[in-house]
Amino acid sequence: MSSVLPLLRGLNSENPDSFRSILLIAALHFAWRSGKLGIYERTYLYHKVKSIESVNKHLNGLSRKGALTCMSTVATLCMVEGSMGNLYEAEAHLDGLLAMLDAVPSDSDQVVTLQHYIVICMREIMEWKRVVCDDKLYSRFSVSRNDDCGRSWMPLHVWTNIDKGAVEERLEALFHIPQYITISRPVTQEIDARGAIKGLRLLTAGKIPSQYVNVGHLWYVLGGQASLVPFSEQPPSSTSRSQEQDPELRSDWLGLALAIGLYMHGTLRQWDSWQAMEGRALRWVISVVEADLNQTQAAMVSGAVNQELWLWKSFAMGFAVKSASRLAKRQGRIDQFILGGDATVQALQQSTAQRIRLWSSVTSRYSWAQAKASLSRIVWPAKVLDENLDQMLWESALQSSQVADPCSRY
């Protein structure tokens, strides 16, 4: 320990923001180990407040270095707060990261870093909220909660004992907190999606060990580490043999990671089960997936990219929008669900229908049975929770009377 102290003092003087982030992560480490912060709670709160003050100072005169510091600090705060069960605070930090997208030039390399951080933080928040909302998980403990289950605070002694051995997996996951992440690939890098798809198939079939699902670190079981793939130079060895038997699935990593998020959120209801996704987050996710689909549309038509994976992304997005809009309407928050309310939802549903019709025309597959077979060759449940909503989505698209198709201009 004595040899580490000089390094920490040097870091404190040279980069106090990084030093504070490391202290916050250390507090999380301690809380996971002991089940509470105890006498260190004041220290944790002090450095949390100082980190927020530092972000505000950087925002007043944002330089490139200051922007990167803000991103890393806010993302670390988001992960730490969410992992402590403070979901209100974690969502506020995620909202701050999404707001930064408007401030950072779109052609800047900082956008790459920011997008990576948002994907990581969004995934963690949605998984934690699912744990808090899941009655089956909650019923295992004598803990009361309020009706606002997706935003309630869960005591750390419960948080850290949801599964035997969960703490060890979480401690390993500390190294995936943005403070420790170095961006090593461009965001446009294509990856082989087979590992991630294999993980999704296991999850869809209910064959994922419960301790991994409940812990909230699905990056561990998704063979291709879909959300963290830019930081992993080699795919996990556990998936390499099976991948050799399947044709390669090339995909933009960001579009794939977010399409997987929509699939888990809307189709499987594994993420954020009882809450519609927050409006700003959903708008960003949809915009990225749509951009990926638009950029690969001509290649899909020509057969240069996997046509079934392209349909799967389109369908996962359309299904998530339809399912979440239903939930938002029942909760009386459709206008907060996505900017523009019903009008925007209808526009998104129309663009999904246009893509479905285009794919159907290109592949000459018109029945739902053919479409579901194509989706299943990627990954799709035998029966969705929303009572044939997937079949309704397909059939309503083909029955649409709109002839003019902007999507067909490839």
Image (tube, helix red, strand yellow):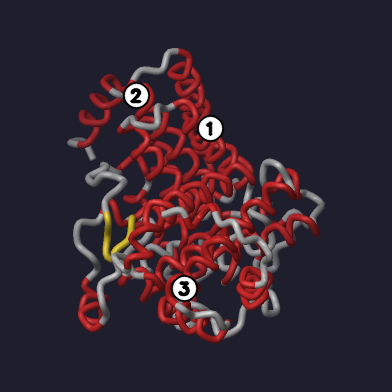
Task: Give the residue number, with chain letter if any, for mark 2.
Answer: 16
What numbered label is drawn on residue 146? Answer: none
- As shown in the figure, which amino acid type bears the numbered disc 1? Ala
In front here: 222 or 180? 222
* Residue 195 spot, x, y in % from top left: 31, 71
- As shown in the figure, which amino acid type bears the numbered disc 3? Gln
What numbered label is drawn on residue 211? Answer: 3
Quarter of the image with the C terminus is bottom left
Give the foreground label among 2 and 1.
1
For label 3, the SS is helix
Quick check: 323 left or right of 73? Answer: right
For the residues marked 2 and 1, what is the alpha-carbon distance in whole angstroms? 24 Å
Residue at screen point 69% across, 62% down:
274
182 up-or-down from 85: above or below: above
Label 3, residues with CA under 10 Å away: few <14, some 14-19, many ≥20: some
For the residues bearing labels 3 and 2, Cβ distance under 8 angstroms: no
Point out the residue furthest to the top here.
61
For the residues bearing labels 1 and 3, Cβ distance under 8 angstroms: no
Task: Give the residue number, with chain letter if any, for mark 1.
Answer: 99
Precedes in sequence: disc 2 or disc 1: 2
* Residue 26 spot, x, y in % from top left: 39, 43
Precedes in sequence: disc 3 or disc 2: 2
Residue at screen point 67% across, 66% down:
400
In front here: 234 or 37? 234
For the residues marked 1 and 3, what is the alpha-carbon distance in whole angstroms? 34 Å
In front here: 65 or 25? 65
For label 2, the SS is helix
